[in-house]
Image: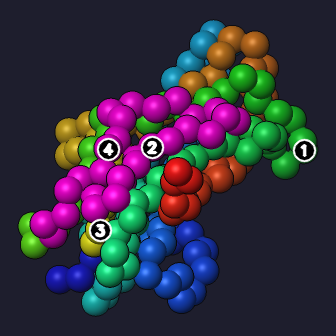
Amino acid sequence: VDVDPENRPTLPENQGLIGIDFISQFDFVHVPIRSSQAYYPALPQKLRDAEDDSAGGERPNYVQISDRREEPTGWTLSARMDEAGFVSEEGHQLRGVQLLLTNIRMATTGSNTSSAPTYWESRELNTGRQILAKADEGQGSGTWVQRFGDGETMDQSVMLEVPVNATPQATSYTGIIHWELSFVPELD
């Protein structure tokens, strides 16, 4: 049975020999407004059965990177929240929010013999660039998945932290995360 993730992001076609294949879109659904500091979990990545488009279960949210170059010279995956942060359709901004990414793991297929990239088990995403994974020369070739959680922790591994002074309103908010996969050679 083929299973595909729901809510695929729009990625450029013909990305070449190295690129980001997939990025989960974090969905925090409807949550109650609180005047105190609050943490809201993102829903796990939903899957669809490719044969009949039925529900196919859930998996941890993830980012998938493929490096198919003959000479793996390394790469760096980083992310940051947009300067605007989380904003409502009316233009109201949630001040000081950040995304907490925890229980981070790197995984690949059993046939991939490449060394794993370096990664951090947790990261706080705000408007500053955060490195999530770094493959040095000879590492990270093939397809790698950076997942946030596992079968037991996937519903608590991506959290939206809303501080006391954020002043949330009874409306929907949207935020943009800028993901970057760079593979610029080091200068001597």
Which sits earlier in the primary sequence, circle 2 or circle 4?
A: 4
Q: Which residue is mark 1?
A: 90
Q: Which residue is mark 4?
A: 118
Give the CA separation, mark 2 to mark 4: 9 Å
Looking at the rendered structure, which numbered label has been put on residue 141?
Answer: 3
| Viewer-side residue, 70 vs 154 | 70
Q: Which residues are magenta?
A: 112-139
Give the CA separation, mark 4 to mark 3: 13 Å
Q: How many marks?
A: 4
Rendered location of residue 43, percent (x, y):
43, 46
> Please, is residue 68 above or below residue 109 in the view?
below
Amino acid carrying label 1: it is Glu
Amino acid carrying label 3: it is Ser
> Please, is residue 105 above or below residue 71 in the view?
above
Q: Nearer the viewer, mark 2 or mark 1?
A: 2
Q: Determine if the magenta segment contains residue 113.
A: yes
Rendered location of residue 182, percent (x, y):
55, 60
The quadrant holding residue 48 is: bottom left
Q: Determine if the magenta segment contains residue 132.
A: yes
Which sits earlier in the primary sequence, circle 4 or circle 3?
A: 4
Which sits earlier in the primary sequence, circle 3 or circle 2?
A: 2
Mark 1 residue element: loop
Q: Which residue is mark 2?
A: 132
Q: Is residue 165 left or right of residue 31?
A: right
